[in-house]
Image (cartoon, rainbow, N blue to C red):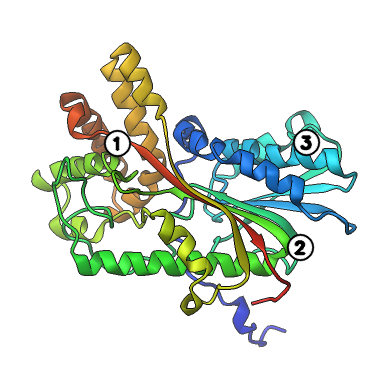
Amino acid sequence: MSGQKPPASASPVAHATTTGMTGGGFYNQNSTPQWDATAAVLNHLEAAADALPIDASGPICLADFGCSEGRNSIAALSRPVSRLVQRTDRPIQTIHSDLPTNDFSSLLRSLRPEGHSVFGQPNVYSSVVGGSMYDQLLPDRSLHMATTFNAIGFLSRKPIATLPGYIFPNGPSAIRNNGFVSEEDQAAFSKLARQDIATFLKARARELVPGGKLLLQVFGANETASTCDGIYDLLNDAVLGFVENGSISQDVYAAYYQPVYMRTLEELTGPVSDPALGAAGVFQIDHATSYEIPVSFNEHFSADGDLETYARDYVNFFRAFTEAVLKNALPANDQRDTLVEQIYEKAIQLLKAAPDLYPFRYIAVAALMTRTDSRVI
């Protein structure tokens, strides 16, 4: 067998633009806003569980794509699990998936505390799957419900090599207005963001049974604000401080950007019916919404005025999902870890000095869908 060529489908596809969220429990500890955005749409997931076709035999399979360290993933899937165990005696399997470079340790420790399922039922079984959400990761028609929360904002690839004027594709906020992204570059990211949704839908369409449910939720933008406002202005300003003192070269700054895109609701749902993207006709949108959630560290600061705690919580929040990309963009040398620490400390100092320059609002978009036919695409 040693000389046999593997099939083309076995060839690896480079989809990861990050190595994952900051591990060691850091993401779990600093992802309360993400959980609040997830929790706001879980009533739709419960309703989906109530309507799920469960007449066949075998396990009912639920998968969450982009699970990170698992705190939010377990809490989210517990909602449909609690509804399904009331409807059926069939075994239930929860599948938690993220990039192979993700820190699965916290998740694995959490899934079976003291030798029992964290979901509190003897017939609930859990597993993890490493891989990109842009690939098919499970067998055809093996999945009954799929979810992804605050994850598909990470693009499948970097569509352009450099972004010389700012570190984020959507560009700086109107409040800070420190930097620029050209219309041409913005169009490249917008196009890829739509293609990524279609790619994700096609992969899930193959995995889901007819009548299966998909809940797609992610941070986004509306007519008045974007979730990138504030946080990326702050990180950009912190990085520029080290460009100015010579610690980071202009070339490194130009090549570094966060490969994340803030979608509007139309950008999230449009690929469902766009025939040009190849996913039209396999999902029906049951419910779609754009919404804003209160941000916990904003509310605490408003109540107690503790600027030190506010700055630390604010920066740790975005450090949890930006650190891996930032670190990998810097030259790999003995000073890299120290420089990363200095950048985030600089962000804290900038925020404490001028909190009004970096206001943060959390906009999210979500859509619940049903797999409409049995066609495998």
Q: Which residue is mark 2?
A: 142
At horizontal 73% and vertical 46% (from top left) the residue drawn is 49
Q: Earlier in the sequence, mark 2 or mark 1?
A: 2
Label 1 Cα crowd, 10 Å radius (few <14 / some 14-19 / many 20+): few
Q: Amino acid at mark 1?
A: Glu
- Residue 341, label in figure: 1
Q: Give coordinates of residue 62: x percent, y percent.
A: 71, 51
Distance from label 2 to label 3 (Cα)?
21 Å
Vertical placement of residue 198 versus 94, above or below = below
Q: Give coordinates of residue 138: x percent, y percent.
A: 69, 63
Label 3 Cα crowd, 10 Å radius (few <14 / some 14-19 / many 20+): some
Vertical placement of residue 320 versus 60, above or below = above
Q: Give coordinates of residue 36: x percent, y percent.
A: 50, 33
Q: Give coordinates of residue 326: x percent, y percent.
A: 31, 49
Callout 2: SS: loop
Q: Which residue is mark 3?
A: 117
At horizontal 17% and vertical 50% (from top left) the residue drawn is 248
Q: Amino acid at mark 3?
A: Ser
Q: Earlier in the sequence, mark 2 or mark 3?
A: 3
Vertical placement of residue 181 versus 8, above or below = above
Q: Nearer the viewer, mark 2 or mark 1?
A: 2
Label 2 Cα crowd, 10 Å radius (few <14 / some 14-19 / many 20+): some
Distance from label 2 to label 1 (Cα)?
44 Å
